[in-house]
C-alpha cells in the first residue's frame, strides 16, 4: 500500500477540525451564551450567525449584530458591546424587563439599573416590567413614558437622597400610561436632614389616559400622589399612607402635607380639563400629615378609606380632613362640577371626615355645583363628620355620622362649635342653594357625648340668596345638642325656602343667630313638618318677619337672649296647617316679646316656665304667677262655670278651688264666684 500523501492528510485533518468547531458553535447556539461570552464574539462569527441566545437567568433572549450602530453604549440589557466594538442588540417583542440590566448582585443602589431600563422602555416604546418581589433602591427622579408593571415590587428612595425639593420619584410624561403592581417608598425617616428634601411620590400632568392600579405610595415627606389635568384618570385598588409628613421643614409647610392632590390648573375649554370621566375607586388615604385627599375636580370618589389624617396638623383650629374638596385654585370663575362621594369611610381625622368646601384660592367667583355625598360612614373625627359649604344643587343622603366632634376645645381653650354630624355652611359670601339633606342618621352613642348636633346650618359671612333647602326623613336622635341647628356668627339673611319634614330627634329645628341676624329674608318661607320629635321648632335670639308654616308640629320653642325681640305679625306670617293646637314655649333673659292673635287658632304659650295666654301686645307677667292671661280687647274664662248642684257635687274639693256659679230661678242672688276653704264653700264678694 503506498504511503499517504502528506498534503491530503493535512487537508483531511483541517476539515475534521472545522467540523468539530462548527459542532461546538452549533451546540453553543443551542445551549446559549453568557454575557461575557457574547461580549467576546468576533466579527466573523456575528456575521455568520443570525442570532445569539443568552442563557443567563433573568436575561434570557436573543441578540443580533447591528452593523449600522457604532455609538450605543453597553447597558448590559438591551445593547452589548463586544471587545471589538461590535453592537449586539436584544430582540424585544412586547416588553422590557428590569432584570436584563442587572449585572452585579448585592448592589445597595440601583439608580443606574432602573435608569437604563426606563430609557430602553422609552426608546422601544414597550412597557417596563420590574423585578418581582424585589426592592429597587434609587436616588433619581425618573420620567416615565411607557407602562410600568410590577409584582409586589418596591421602588424605594435611598437614605439621604439628593433629589431636589418638590421633585417626584416618578413623573409621568405620556398620554397613555398604566402603573400597576408596585410600591413607591419615600423613606421619609431617613430623608429628613435637609430643608430641600421634601420629595414627592408620583406626579403626572396632561396625561389623557392615566391609570394607577394596585399602587401603594408610602412615607413621602411631600405630596404622595399629585395629579393635574388628566382628563381620564383612574386610581383604583391602591393606597396612600404616611405621606406629606414632617412638612414643618418645607417651604410651603401646609400645602406640602397632602397625601394625594387631584386638581385642574386649566379651564374647561382645554383638552386636558379633568372632569366626570375620572374616578378614584377603592383607594385608602391614611395617616397623612394634612388632608388624606384633596380634590379640585368633579370626579367620582367611590369606596375610599379616609382615616387618621392630619394628626400632625392640629396646632391651629382647622385640623385636616379625610378628603377636602374645593374648586380649582388660582383660576378665575373656577368651577367644580359633578363630584360624587359615595360609600366612603372617614374615621379619626383631625378635621372633618368629608370636607366639601369653598375657599379664597380661586381668583374670582369660585363655584361648587352638582354634588352628591351619599352612603358614607364618618365617625370619631375631631370636627364634623360631613361638611358642605356654599354649594348649589347638592344632595346629602344615606350617610351615617356618629361620635364626631372629638375635639371639644380649640387651642385657645374656647369651645369648638364644629361638632355636628353634618354641616351645611355659607362661606366667602357665597350662598347655598337647591340642596336636599335626607335619609341620614347622625347620633352619638357614648355616655360623654361630643357630637353636638345632628345637622347644623352655619353662616360665617353674609349669605344673601340662600334658598330651596329640604331636610327630610333624617334620624337626628341622641346628639348632645340639637337635632337641627341654624346658627350664624355674623349677619345672615337666609333662607328663602326651607322645608323640614319627617325628621326624628329632640329639638328638631333650632335657630341661633348672632349680631342681629334675621331669619328669613323678605318674601321667604320656612316650612316645617316634623312627624317625630320634641321641640320641633326652636328659635333663639331672632326676629322673624316672614312666613313660617307649621304642619303637625306639637311644640314651638323660642329662646330670646341679649335684648332680642320676637315678632310674629299675624296669620300672614305664621300658618298652622293642623287640627291640634301648637304649644309655644317662650323664654328670654331680657328684651321684649310681641305676640298677635293667630287667626283665632287655639294655642298655649309656656313662657319662662309659666303659662301665659297672650292675644297681642308686649308679653308681661308677674314673676310670682304660674298662669297669666294678657289681652287688651278680650277677657278670660279661666274659672269653670256650673250650677249650684254641680258645685256641691264636686268630690273632695281642694282648698282654694274656684268656680263660678250660674244664675238659676229662685236663687238669682247666689250667682257669683265661689272658693272652697277649710270651712267649706264661700262666696267671694
Image (cartoon, rainbow, N blue to C red):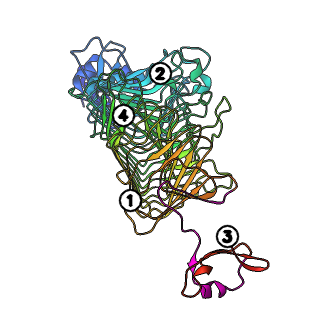
From this viewpoint, is residue 581 visible?
Answer: yes
Magenta stretch, main secondary structure, is loop
Judge depth for marks 2 and 4 and give the one in front: 4
The answer to whether residue 632 is magenta is yes
Foreground of the two, 27 or 606:
606
Instruction: Describe the element under mark 3 as helix, strand or loop.
Output: loop
Q: Name the foreground residue: 254 vs 190.
A: 254
> Nearer the N terminus, badge 2 or badge 1?
2
Name the mark on residue 111: 2
Say whether residue 242 is left or right of residue 531.
Answer: right
Label pair 4/1, CB-CB below 8 angstroms: no
Q: Which residues are magenta?
A: 625-654
Residue closer to the observer: 385 or 377 = 385
Task: Return the residue nearer the eye: 494 or 133.
Answer: 494
Residue 599's label in the rendered image is 1
Query: Which residue is labeled 3 in the image?
Result: 685
As measured in the structure, the alpha-carbon distance from the residue carrying label 2 to the one carrying label 4 is: 58 Å
Horizontal arrangement in the rendering, residue 554 relative to residue 26 (left or right): right
**Is residue 649 positioned above or below 86 on the image?**
below
x, y percent for residue 575: 37, 57
Q: Which residue is denoted by mark 4 in the rendering? A: 464
Q: Residues within 10 Å of mark 1 (few under 14, many from 20)?
A: few
**Secondary structure beneath disc 4?**
loop
Residue 33 visible, this orientation = no
Amino acid at each position: 500500500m503506498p504511503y499517504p500523501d502528506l498534503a491530503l492528510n493535512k487537508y483531511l485533518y483541517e476539515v475534521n477540525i472545522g467540523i468539530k468547531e462548527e459542532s461546538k458553535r452549533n451546540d453553543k447556539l443551542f445551549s446559549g451564551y453568557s454575557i461575557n461570552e457574547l461580549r467576546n464574539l468576533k466579527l466573523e462569527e456575528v456575521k455568520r450567525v443570525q442570532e445569539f441566545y443568552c442563557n443567563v437567568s433573568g436575561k434570557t433572549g436573543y441578540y443580533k449584530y447591528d452593523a449600522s450602530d457604532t455609538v450605543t453604549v453597553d447597558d448590559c440589557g438591551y445593547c452589548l458591546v463586544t471587545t471589538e466594538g461590535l453592537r449586539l442588540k436584544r430582540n424585544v417583542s412586547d416588553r422590557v424587563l428590569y432584570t436584563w440590566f442587572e449585572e452585579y448582585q448585592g448592589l445597595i443602589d440601583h439608580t443606574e439599573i432602573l435608569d437604563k431600563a426606563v430609557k430602553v422602555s422609552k426608546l422601544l416604546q414597550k412597557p417596563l416590567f420590574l423585578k418581582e418581589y424585589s426592592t429597587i433602591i434609587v436616588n433619581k427622579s425618573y420620567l416615565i413614558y411607557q407602562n410600568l408593571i410590577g409584582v409586589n415590587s418596591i421602588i424605594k428612595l435611598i437614605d439621604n437622597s439628593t433629589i431636589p425639593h418638590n421633585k417626584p420619584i416618578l413623573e409621568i410624561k405620556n398620554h397613555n400610561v398604566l402603573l400597576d403592581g408596585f410600591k413607591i417608598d419615600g423613606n421619609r425617616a431617613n430623608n429628613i436632614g435637609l430643608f430641600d428634601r421634601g420629595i414627592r411620590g408620583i406626579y403626572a400632568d396632561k396625561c389623557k389616559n392615566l391609570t394607577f392600579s394596585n399602587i401603594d405610595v408610602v412615607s413621602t415627606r411631600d405630596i404622595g400622589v399629585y395629579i393635574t389635568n388628566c382628563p381620564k384618570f383612574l386610581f383604583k385598588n391602591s393606597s396612600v399612607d404616611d405621606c406629606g409628613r414632617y412638612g414643618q421643614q418645607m417651604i410651603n409647610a401646609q400645602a406640602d402635607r397632602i397625601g394625594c392632590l387631584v386638581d385642574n390648573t386649566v379651564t374647561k375649554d382645554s383638552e386636558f380639563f379633568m372632569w366626570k370621566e375620572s374616578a378614584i375607586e377603592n383607594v385608602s388615604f391614611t395617616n397623612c400629615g394634612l388632608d388624606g385627599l384633596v380634590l379640585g375636580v368633579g370626579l367620582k370618589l367611590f369606596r375610599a378609606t379616609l382615616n387618621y389624617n392630619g394628626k400632625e396638623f392640629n396646632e391651629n383650629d382647622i385640623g385636616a380632613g379625610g378628603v377636602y374638596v374645593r374648586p380649582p385654585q388660582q383660576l378665575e370663575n373656577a368651577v367644580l362640577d359633578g363630584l360624587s362621594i359615595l360609600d366612603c369611610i372617614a374615621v379619626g381625622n383631625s378635621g372633618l371626615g368629608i370636607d366639601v368646601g369653598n375657599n379664597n384660592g380661586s381668583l374670582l367667583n369660585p363655584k361648587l355645583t352638582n354634588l352628591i355625598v351619599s352612603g358614607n360612614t364618618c365617625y370619631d373625627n375631631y370636627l364634623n363628620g360631613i361638611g358642605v359649604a356654599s354649594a348649589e344643587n347638592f344632595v346629602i343622603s344615606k350617610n351615617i355620622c356618629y361620635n364626631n366632634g372629638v375635639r371639644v376645645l380649640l387651642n385657645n381653650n374656647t369651645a369648638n362649635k364644629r361638632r355636628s354630624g353634618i354641616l351645611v355652611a355659607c362661606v366667602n359670601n357665597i350662598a347655598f342653594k337647591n340642596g336636599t339633606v335626607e335619609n341620614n342618621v347622625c347620633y352619638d352613642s357614648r355616655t360623654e357625648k361630643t357630637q353636638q348636633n345632628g345637622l347644623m346650618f352655619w353662616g360665617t359671612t353674609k349669605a344673601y340668596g340662600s334658598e330651596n333647602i329640604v331636610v327630610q326623613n333624617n334620624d337626628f336622635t341622641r346628639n348632645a345638642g340639637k337635632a337641627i341647628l341654624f346658627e350664624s356668627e355674623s349677619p345672615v339673611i337666609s333662607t328663602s325656602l326651607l322645608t323640614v319634614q319627617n325628621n326624628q330627634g329632640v329639638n328638631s329645628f333650632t335657630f341661633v343667630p348672632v349680631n342681629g341676624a334675621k331669619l328669613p329674608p323678605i318674601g321667604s318661607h320656612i316650612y316645617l313638618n316634623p312627624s317625630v320629635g320634641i321641640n320641633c321648632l326652636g328659635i333663639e335670639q331672632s326676629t322673624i318677619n316672614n312666613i313660617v308654616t307649621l304642619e303637625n308640629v306639637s311644640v314651638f320653642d323660642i329662646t330670646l337672649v341679649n335684648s332680642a325681640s320676637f315678632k310674629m305679625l299675624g296669620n300672614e306670617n305664621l300658618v298652622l296647617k293642623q287640627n291640634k293646637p301648637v304649644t309655644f314655649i317662650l323664654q328670654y333673659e331680657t328684651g321684649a316679646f310681641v305676640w298677635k292673635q293667630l287667626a283665632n287658632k287655639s294655642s298655649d304659650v309656656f313662657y319662662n316656665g309659666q303659662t301665659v295666654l297672650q292675644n297681642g301686645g308686649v308679653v308681661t307677667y308677674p314673676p310670682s304667677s304660674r298662669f297669666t292671661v294678657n289681652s287688651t280687647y278680650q277677657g278670660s274664662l279661666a274659672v269653670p262655670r256650673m250650677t249650684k248642684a254641680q258645685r256641691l257635687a264636686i268630690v273632695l274639693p281642694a282648698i282654694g278651688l274656684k268656680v263660678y256659679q250660674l244664675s238659676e230661678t229662685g236663687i238669682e242672688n247666689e250667682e257669683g264666684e265661689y272658693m272652697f276653704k277649710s270651712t267649706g264653700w264661700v262666696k267671694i264678694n
